[in-house]
Image (cartoon, helix red, strand yellow):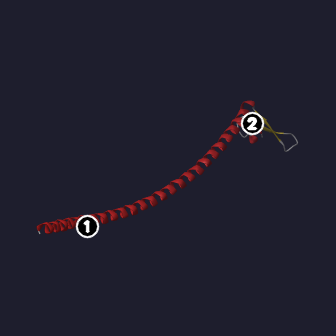
Amino acid sequence: MANRYRSREGLSARAVANSDEVQVRIDPVHAELDEEILGLHRQVSQLKQVAQEIETEARIQNDIVSDLQRLMSNAQAGVKHGMRRLNRTINQQRSNHVLQVITFGLVCFFVVYMWSKHFRR
């Protein structure tokens, strides 16, 4: 009957006469195992908490990265728009610049022509 109640090494049980109670005797060598198991249980609980904190931090980091990606794509679109406007302005300035050079040349030619007409007389 004692073998029927044996659960692990170091523990043994025996039936008490005229009772449904069971007495358990713990071998002192294996009593340290219970303390060791409790210590391991605490460490597992701590590791679980650390894993949950890591998961929370990873979620926060992923949200930050997503926000940064969105911000970068918005900035990239803004820069493209700005570059298009700048290129358009530069092309218009070139056109105006050429027009200004032609106008300056015509004015100079007209002044020289008038000067020469005036001194010929």
- Residue corresponding to mark 1: 99
**Label 2 element class:** strand
Using residue 17 as the reference point, say whether residue 7 is left or right of it. Answer: left
Query: Residue 95's image quarter?
Result: bottom left
The relative height of residue 99 versus residue 57 in the rendered view (above or below) is below
Give the secondary structure at mark 1. helix
N-terminal of the pair, mark 2 or mark 1, is 2
The residue under label 1 is which amino acid type?
Leu
Give neighbour class at mark 1: few <14, some 14-19, many 20+ (Cα, 10 Å): few
Residue 100 against residue 43 in the figure, above or below: below
Task: Look at 65% across and 43% down and name the residue there.
Answer: 46
Question: Viewed as shown, does residue 67 lie left or right of 76?
Answer: right
Out of 77 and 19, give the one closest to the viewer: 77
Residue 92 located left or right of residue 8: left
Please give the count of numbered marks on the rendered protein.
2
Numbered mark located on residue 39 in the image? none
Which residue ends up furthest to the right in the rendered image?
Answer: 18
Q: Compared to 102, does 40 lie above or below?
A: above
Q: Residue furthest top?
A: 29
Which residue in the protein does label 2 denote?
A: 11
Residue 73 x, y percent position in the rendering:
45, 59
Q: Is residue 97 left or right of residue 17?
A: left
| Residue nearer the viewer, 56 or 51 | 56
x, y (%) of residue 104? 23, 65
Instruction: Name the outermost residue toward the front.
Output: 121
Mark 2 to mark 1 CA distance (whole Å): 105 Å
Image quarter hosting the N terminus:
top right
Q: Residue furthest left?
A: 120
**Can you give x and y, in whole percent of width and height, for residue 93 in the image?**
31, 64
